[in-house]
Image (cartoon, grey):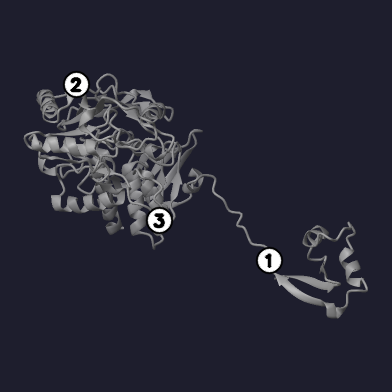
Amino acid sequence: MALKIWVARNNDTLRIIADTKRVSIDELITLNPSIESPDQNIAGKLVNLPFFTESDMRQVAIPPTCHIPPEYIENWIPLTSLETMAENEYDVLIVGTGAGGGTMLWRLCEQWRNNGKRIGIIERGNIVMPTHGRNLPMMNRTRLEQYYRYLSKPLQGSYPEFIGAREVICLGGRTVFWDLVASRLVLSLLPDWPIPIPEMDTYYDIAERVMNVNDEYARGSTLTEILLDRLQKGGFSESRYMPIAADIHPTKFGEVHADVFFSSFSLIAKASFFRPFDLAINARAVQVLVDQGKAVGVKVMSPDMSSYILKAKTIVLSASTYETPRLLLQSGIQGEAVGRYMTNQVFMLAPGKVSRRDFTDIPGTLAILITATPEKPYQIRLVGPSGYDWYPSSEAKPFLEELDILIQCFGKIDPRYENRVTLNPNRKDEYGVPEIEVHFSFSEAERVEIQKMVESVKHISSVADITLGEICLVPTGDLHHTSGTCRMGDDPSTSVTNRYGQVHGISGLYVADNSVLPFIGSGNPTLTTVALAIRTADQIVTRA
């Protein structure tokens, strides 16, 4: 209802009189600063003044005060308590928020945007960043590496065979630090890949669109263009611009392009605009609950050691190559292949220099990918000296006579039964879950392949006119391309899930992270993990 205000004019002086039942004396004085009296009856006195007559007065109205909703959220992303989640039964409950979990959430929310399905997702860690680290303007490559070392923790049980392994336990998982190279696996080089290649191409297309994968980031840079030309003319015809998950399109029509570089936050954000879901952090999954061959829930613990049962019709494990098999084994799901066939890649670095005279005043960024071939079944990248120089930087750089570059080589490691993670019953974490032990070694064939990689690097340096430094191998486990511990396949004796990521023999239990990849060859697994998670989500939607 509009407030009634009486306005009267006398000798060109405007007087405002209000009903004191609706307006306090302070508001009255504010409306008419010429009124100077603390008397609460001032409105009545003014009305009774002789120069105010009924004919002098007229009634006007002003709008009511705007309503400001009192609701709020306590963080930049809405969170749900475990107490609240324990009161519900979820159609799908996702464990883990990395590449697989974030993708699964996005796809389910997209497909189920107009129905009443209930979706929940839990994260063992806390919130440490709202995006990929490279999207934060105060980060440079040195600070990002330092912050990664601070936030990540050595993988317990990895010493001495997998000494470089570390875990990133936080909202977004390892995608807040990943290197953004989003290349497809060369599936024709991978034996017995369980999904038809045309179907994989379809899901690769979807994954590339949602991740903004493109090869335009370094295109036009003289550093990239000249070295790419030298490589292609020198016998490396498979050299190409590096595909990077980066949104490089300008903002138009009011679109928001806040995060250039992709992380699972990009998909969690998209999911939140499709429909609501429940998200809990600091939620440690300690057991998958199974009843008569069907997954029915997850036992979860909070940092204060309180225990909760989250009920669900379908459960998706996206906890990581280490934590997903750990959770399965701890839950008594003892398939013959659980934790077995662990694979990674040989990771070799070769620093080098090129003459500054060969490039323009602004040489630009360097991002070249040499894909694997049957003759050279390893992937090679040419990047900046840290491996991150295709990222932007506001740092001033002095003029140098030589430019530092880095050649990165990724050699395949075949899945072998003896490379595995197992539980160590003698060592448990604070939640009572046994730590894992990693058993890993190179085969003789892989050692031979390392020598071939060295020769290939020398050939690259020759045709690209690069002066090489000392070639070295990165400690095993430091490259976070570990895969295969819950691999998909048709045979339950050699795989953990079927072709759609469902655990053999248990309905309603799926895996969607790097652990489900049966082979990775020499490529970065992230794009493939996202593509397979989309495919698994579609299977869940179809069967719901």
In the rendered image, which residue does mark 1 sit on?
64
In the rendered image, which residue does mark 2 sit on?
471
- Dot 3 surroundings within 10 Å: few (below 14), some, or many (20 or more)? few
> Which numbered disc, 3 or 2, marks the residue that appears first in the sequence?
3
Query: Residue sitting at 22 percent across and 29 percent down?
Result: 357
> Which numbered disc, 2 or 1, marks the residue that appears first in the sequence?
1
Q: CA distance from mark 3 to mark 2?
A: 45 Å
* Residues tagged 3 and 1 counted as in contact (Cβ below 8 A): no
Which one is nearer the viewer's eye here, 491 or 99? Answer: 99
36 shown above or below 475? below
> Which numbered disc, 3 or 1, marks the residue that appears first in the sequence?
1
Q: Is residue 463 left or right of residue 476?
A: left
Q: Amino acid at mark 1?
A: Pro
Q: CA distance from mark 2 to mark 1?
A: 74 Å
Q: Secondary structure at mark 1?
A: loop
Task: Please provide percent x and percent y for residue 469.
Answer: 20, 20
Which one is nearer the viewer's eye here, 343 or 271? Answer: 271
Q: Secondary structure at mark 2?
A: loop
Q: Is residue 201 left or right of residue 178?
A: left
Task: Please provide percent x and percent y for residue 417.
Answer: 17, 30
Query: Residue sitting at 32 percent across and 53 percent down?
Result: 107
Q: CA distance from mark 3 to mark 1?
A: 34 Å
Task: Please provide percent x and percent y for residue 470.
Answer: 20, 19
In the rendered image, which residue does mark 3 sit on?
255
Task: Please provide percent x and percent y for residue 323.
Answer: 33, 34
